[in-house]
Image: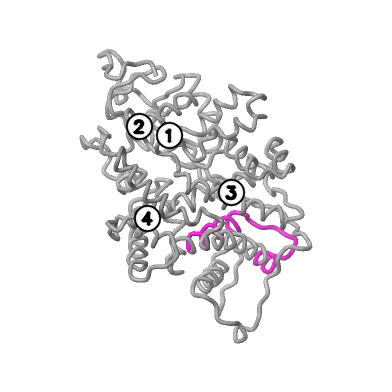
Amino acid sequence: MEAQPHATAPADSPALGSLAVQPLLTAEFDADPGAVYRRLRATYGPVAPVGLMGVPVWLVLDYREVLEVLKNESQWRRDVRYWRARAQGELPYDWPLLAGYEVRQMMFMDDEEHRAARRTHHAALRPFQDAKSPVGWELRQAVARYADELVALLAAESGRTGHCDLGAQYTRPLLLMVTTKLFGCPVDLGDELVMDLWRMLDGGPDAGPATGRALAAFTRLAAHRRARPGDDLTSYLMLADPDLDDEQLGRELFMNAVYLNDITGNMVLNTLLEVLRGNATVRRSLSAGQLGETVNRAALANPPVANMCFRFAARDVRLGGFWIRAGDIVSPSAAAAHQDLLAIGSSTMVGSTVSTRAHLGWGAGPHQCPSAARELGALIVSTAVGRVFDHFAQAELTLPPDQLPWRSGPVVRGLKVLPVRYALSPDAPVLHRPDPGLLPAVPHQESQARGLLAALRRLMPGGRKES
């Protein structure tokens, strides 16, 4: 930063709205976003003006400047009400990315309101974070068990050798099963969840309706759990803050579902991809048994959130080569910042364990992913990745890495599919199919998980419809 706290932009400095910006989301960006970031950096420096679905935005490219935006909460606000263009009615009425930002929950709060919401989340998540607590132990067992069940299901449906999609047939159903258990969801809330979260994040034409459907589903869940509390995150959030009504609780669950399903799911798939594509540093850490380091290295190479949540300038300030005016919108790019960090560090930083922890996969600053949620997410990613390499004797990509299809939207860059040719190890789990009449009674939550697994079988590619 190069400005005094209350500096004012010079009158002759270009305003964001006056610049002829090029759209960010182009065919070139879909194919190779890294090349676009390099070109923007060469043209503009650490900060570049871009067009995002018809709206001008400052894109922050360099690691130092991204950290400044993430860490300085007094200058860079998360509350969408600071956005001048929105306040003055200058946005297209149907701008698809606005729907998610209008959901008032912890991610889009500032100062004490935000800190109070984080305390509530810490209190609600703490029992699951503690491996010695009954619910923490049970969740860890459930994540591993769900992963084993999905591998066993894969073997039953596709054989112990063959082809599969580690996205549709493993990662996405695993995260949906974990969400169902952690949130205490009735099974009928599950099927609609992931696609609507994708639609909201990717800013498609139906982002608004998708956001509304997801919020309605989580509000119903809040009401359901208020009437029937249990050992789940929804009930613990109510205990941590009894003043939360069903609508506000639904908003917080919505935010948690985005992170748990999409962001954590991307981290699982990106880690698997970096290993399968032969990323040397990632493979070295995996071979050494350092699974957490494997995840860190993969997140540095390919962060699960490419461009992080918008910030809004509280006052005029100079950033990079431009004056950012109060109320301007800024998008800090984790993907571009990592590219910059790797270029600066070259071989010395990539090889350092400390440097890999500099990745922005969990964010940074006051709004970074809460530590309890971050540890829970890391547990899920490590378990999901570790179970694949425990059970697969062989796995190789069936497409060249540069031909894999991506969801390359304004926020995430996530794999649509991760197709592999595989061979399961001899001790990989087997799916047994006992006579339903001989099954013993099972606890309600376990019955929910089995019901969800059956529903997922029908949704998976090649899954058989059951009569």
Q: Which amino acid lies under the numbered mark 2 shown in the image of this protein? A: Glu
Q: Which amino acid lies under the numbered mark 1 shown in the image of this protein? A: Gly
Q: Residues within 10 Å of mark 2 (few under 14, many from 20)?
A: some
Find the distance from the CA under tag 3 to the CA under tag 2.
Answer: 30 Å
Task: Report helix, strand or loop for mark 4.
Answer: helix
Question: Pointer 3: what residue?
Answer: 268
Question: Pointer 2: what residue?
Answer: 73
Q: Disc 2 or 4, which lies upstream in sequence?
A: 2
Find the distance from the CA under tag 4 to the CA under tag 1.
Answer: 30 Å
Question: Is 372 inside the magenta-drawn segment?
Answer: no
Q: Which amino acid lies under the numbered mark 4 shown in the image of this protein? A: Ala
Count the labels in the image.
4
Question: Pointer 4: what residue?
Answer: 210
Q: Disc 4 or 1, which lies upstream in sequence?
A: 4
Q: Residue furthest right?
A: 426
Q: Main secondary structure of the magenta part?
A: helix
Q: Which amino acid lies under the numbered mark 3 shown in the image of this protein? A: Val
- Mark 3 and mark 4 in contact (Cβ < 8 Å)? no
**Place of residue 435 in the rendered image (x, y in percent of width and height, measured from the top left):** 64, 84
Q: 309 and 141: which one is in front?
A: 141
Looking at the image, is mark 3 or mark 1 nearer the viewer? 1
Give the residue drawn at x 33%, y 66%. 226
User: Which image quarter holds the N terminus?
Assistant: top left
- Magenta range is 153-180
Task: Report helix, strand or loop for mark 1.
Answer: helix
- Mark 1 and mark 4 in contact (Cβ < 8 Å)? no
Q: Quadrant of residue 215?
A: bottom left
